[in-house]
Image (cartoon, rainbow, N blue to C red):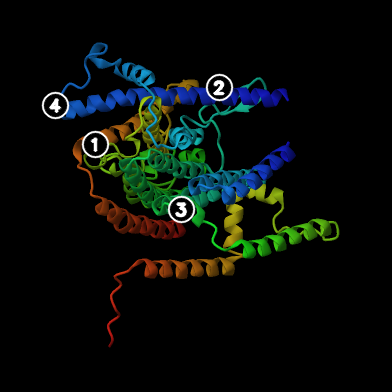
Amino acid sequence: MTELSLRLAVSLAQIAAVMGIVMLTVMILTLAERKVLGWMQDRMGPMEVGPYGILQPIADGLKLFFKEDIVPAGANKAMFTLAPILAMVPAMIGFAVIPFGPNVTVDVFGITIKPFVISDINIGVLYILAFASIGAYGIILGGWSSNSKYSLLGGLRSAAQVISYELNVGLAIVGVLLLSGSLSLVTITQAQAGGFWHWFIWGARPDGFFPIHTQIFAFVVFVISAVAETNRVPFDLPEAESELVAGFFTEYSGMRFAFFFIAEYANMVLVSCVAASLFLGGWNAPYPGTILGYAGLEQLAWIENVAWFTLKVYMFLFLFFWLRATLPRLRYDQLMRFGWKVMLPIALANIVVTAITAYFFPR
Amino acid sequence: MEQIFFFYFAFVIAATSVLVVAMRNPVYSALALLIMFFHVAGLYVTLHAEFLAAVQIIVYAGAILVLYLFVVMLLNLKQDDRYHRQWPMAAAVGVTLFVEAIILTVMKGWTAPLAATGTETTIGEAGNTEAIGDVLYSTYLFPFEVASLILLVAMIGAIVLAKKDLGEPTES
């Protein structure tokens, strides 16, 4: 029983650490988004709170925390409270299978733990897809329970959008699964070791350079669909402010609003982590091995790996901001046509081509 | 330990299944169904069928139930419209199933357990997903293809039903 409780304690410590890092990233993102948007539009961004506005997230958090908690008249109170939780939990729970660093094991008090992944389950990718699909409930129920037509319309739009683009995310991943032969994110990341030409976006075989199994089409489909699934510009139809006030969270205020807000940003971080792990080699450096490893500091090589992973994730997050600053919102019928008639055929064709090349030129 | 988990999951599945049909508000029914799907997935995990558990959530909770919820919200059902005159039929089916369950429970002592095609150790070595893939594309290839054909037919049927402006076929 002591071993069980020790394992429980270790797991809880890991969960707390990952939660802390994710929440910190979300805080940084709220500021970074406003700053990046500001610079792209030739403005300063927030400058008042702290030097260069770096304390702005804390001020925002305090403000939301002390805001009056309003439940609109005629709203379904239980559902109105449940919806933000249903949006937040799936966004957080997906991080359990993300490998943040090399697949090393450490012995602590006689039990073996993997410090850089909370749980290396053999269906990691499916687990993330499953909980990503649950996130739609928070948005739908939030829209329905608010007793407001703008909220309801936003919720319904979101339901249609998430279902359509979830399919493309799932199909875009299949090529990677065919090549790696595993559903575990740890194994998939390890299969991409040894230089950037082995990343699945290029897909060279372990002994070669030629990008024969390239997944670049799947990568593009995945990134576009991921932007759509997180309801970000240019796919932010569920919260289109010029037509729906603020979409499904029109009626939300205070901490409940903050939950939806954090869920959106945590989802962005999650899809960035998944994209980095599946297509860009995760924590692998773009060159074989690690510099610290060659320098004889094998124990510290994990720092370099984690740094590369962080860099890749932040690159994706920057892409999200960049898209928001650059692109106008799609019209609803364009969105649906694009998802079903452009992305879906590309993803399906990618599966066929990958299956054929993987059969004739096995890894 | 496994017994505790089994009875927890079984109890919640039974309770939420009753709630699905007993709730007045169809949105609450859909949520009870969501909780039930999760606990069925939990049951799969205790059986070391992780792949089935994940697929259960993706397909049922993530896709089908969202569509149900979608329809329920749009239709805005009147609460007393839900039970038409289905009571006699439901009672007949329910009694039949109940008697069947009792007979099976009583008979259980006399029947031999079904022969399992893959023992737990062989599945554990190859991995749950690989085991399912192997069986699906070898032993059960024909049923699998038949199922996909049925799904295709259903899909075409849905498209024909949904597409109102299908245009009269030109006589030639």
C-alpha gap between disc 3 and disc 2:
49 Å
Closest to the camera, between mark 3 and mark 4, is 3
Asked if labels 3 and 4 share a chain, the reply is no
Give the chain letter at badge 4: A
Q: Find residue A280 and report its image quarter.
A: top left
- Closer to us: mark 2 or mark 1? 1
Give the percent coordinates (x, y) of residue A53: 25, 16
Q: Amino acid at mark 2?
A: Ala
Marks 2 and 1 sit apart, C-alpha to C-alpha, by 36 Å
The residue where tag 3 is placed is B78
In the image, residue A246 sits, relative to residue B15, either above or below, namely above
- Residue at numbered disc 1: A324
- Say few, some or many: other residues with alpha carbon within 10 Å of mark 3 (under 14 / 14 to 19 / 20 or more): few
Q: Along the polypeptide, which appears first: circle 2 or circle 4? A: 2
Circle 4 is placed at which residue position? A42
Label 3 resides on the chain identified as: B
Going from the N terminus, do you reach mark 2 or mark 1 first?
2
Q: Quadrant of the C terminus of chain B?
A: bottom left
